[in-house]
Amino acid sequence: MIVLKNVSKDYGTGEAVVHALRNVDLEIKSGKMTAILGKSGSGKSTLMNMIGALDKPTEGEVFLDGVNITKLNERELAEYRNKRTGFIFQTFYLEPTFSVLENVCMPLTIAGVNRKIREEKALELLTLFGIPEKKKKLAGELSGGEKQRVAIARALINDPDIILADEPTGNLDSENGEAVMQILRSIASSEKTVILVTHNREDAKRYADTIVELKDGKVDRVLENMEGGKNENPR
Ligand SMILES: Nc1ncnc2c1ncn2[C@@H]1O[C@H](COP(=O)(O)OP(=O)(O)O)[C@@H](O)[C@H]1O
Ligand SMILES: [Mg+2]
């Protein structure tokens, strides 16, 4: 369980201060998909950065399974980010001049894992997502839908228990968007915690177990969604 206690985040100071999050109290269940909905500027990405420990709150605390991650030192934070979280972004952030396999392997390469082992693991994920034959292609040569599959494989290769996806379908056509939502749903159904930021209320309703609506940096409402977990394609 991820718990945010009275989390506020300000950017800037004095007259230029922006209150991106205001006193957010929130519990996010493990092994479920939680969708974060809200207008542009409502604080969705800031909330993701707090949970993923990419940035610290100005005030308040974030707990993961009872551990206060806002109190971790730099080394512990790096370990938390590497081992426990996987990020997926709208713009993929792949290394375009590296091969698909190299991109997926990257977190393990950085961790110093042996090449044969990391490539086997990467290929397993690419196979799961239906693109094993792309392994030698340069990432820059892929379609958007393929790029996002590669980015998801990279996010999963360290076997993190929290997947943070910030508008992952924002640059995809509806067919590829649908496929990516199916993949995220199946990840949540395999006991991982998926936190999805989306503009798309329909996607949230179809796939998420819980829907959190942000408004002006505050939690506007939290909805338990009975339909969410049912819309997974049987594999
Ligand atoms: N690094 C930053 N510096 C200054 N202001 C920021 C920064 N990041 C976000 N903001 C501001 O904080 C508010 C929330 O932003 P963000 O969390 O990105 O919202 P969302 O993801 O919902 O569009 C916005 O007003 C945005 O302009
Ligand atoms: Mg955002």
Image: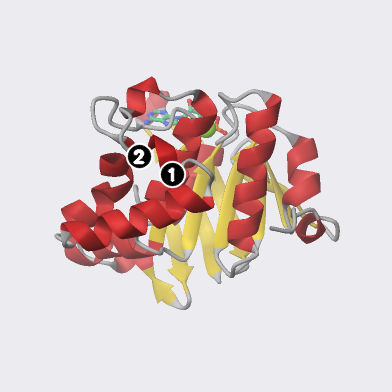
Q: Residue at x 79, y 53 (%)?
A: 231
- Is residue 203 at all visible to an observer of this figure? yes
Which three-letter amino acid code belongs to the residue tagged 2? Lys
Spatial CA span between label 2 and label 1: 6 Å
Dot 1: within a 10 Å radius of its alpha carbon, few (fewer than 14), some, or many (20 or more) residues? some
Q: Nearer the viewer, residue 223 or 101?
A: 101
Identity of the residue furthest to the bottom in this view: 66
Name the residue that disc number 1 marks. Answer: 132
Name the residue that disc number 2 marks. Answer: 135
Q: Nearer the viewer, residue 42 or 94?
A: 94
Residue 218 position within the rendered picture, expressed as x and y whole percent measured from the top left: 63, 45
Identity of the residue furthest to the right in this view: 226
**Is 68 left or right of 208, judged from the image as shown?**
left
Q: Which image quarter is the N terminus in?
A: bottom right
Q: Residue at x 31, y 67 (%)?
A: 71
Is residue 68 shown above or below 156? Answer: below
**Which element is circle 1 on?**
helix
**Is 16 left or right of 28, judged from the image as shown?**
left
Is residue 142 shown above or below 74? Answer: above
Q: Which image quarter is the C terminus in?
A: bottom right
Q: Nearer the viewer, residue 214 or 95?
A: 95
**Labels 2 and 1 touching (C-beta < 8 A):** yes
Q: Residue at x 76, y 60 (%)?
A: 229
Which three-letter amino acid code belongs to the residue tagged 1? Pro
Q: Quadrant of residue 174?
A: top right
Dot 2: within a 10 Å radius of its alpha carbon, few (fewer than 14), some, or many (20 or more) residues? many
Q: Quadrant of residue 26?
A: bottom right
**Which element is circle 2 on?**
loop
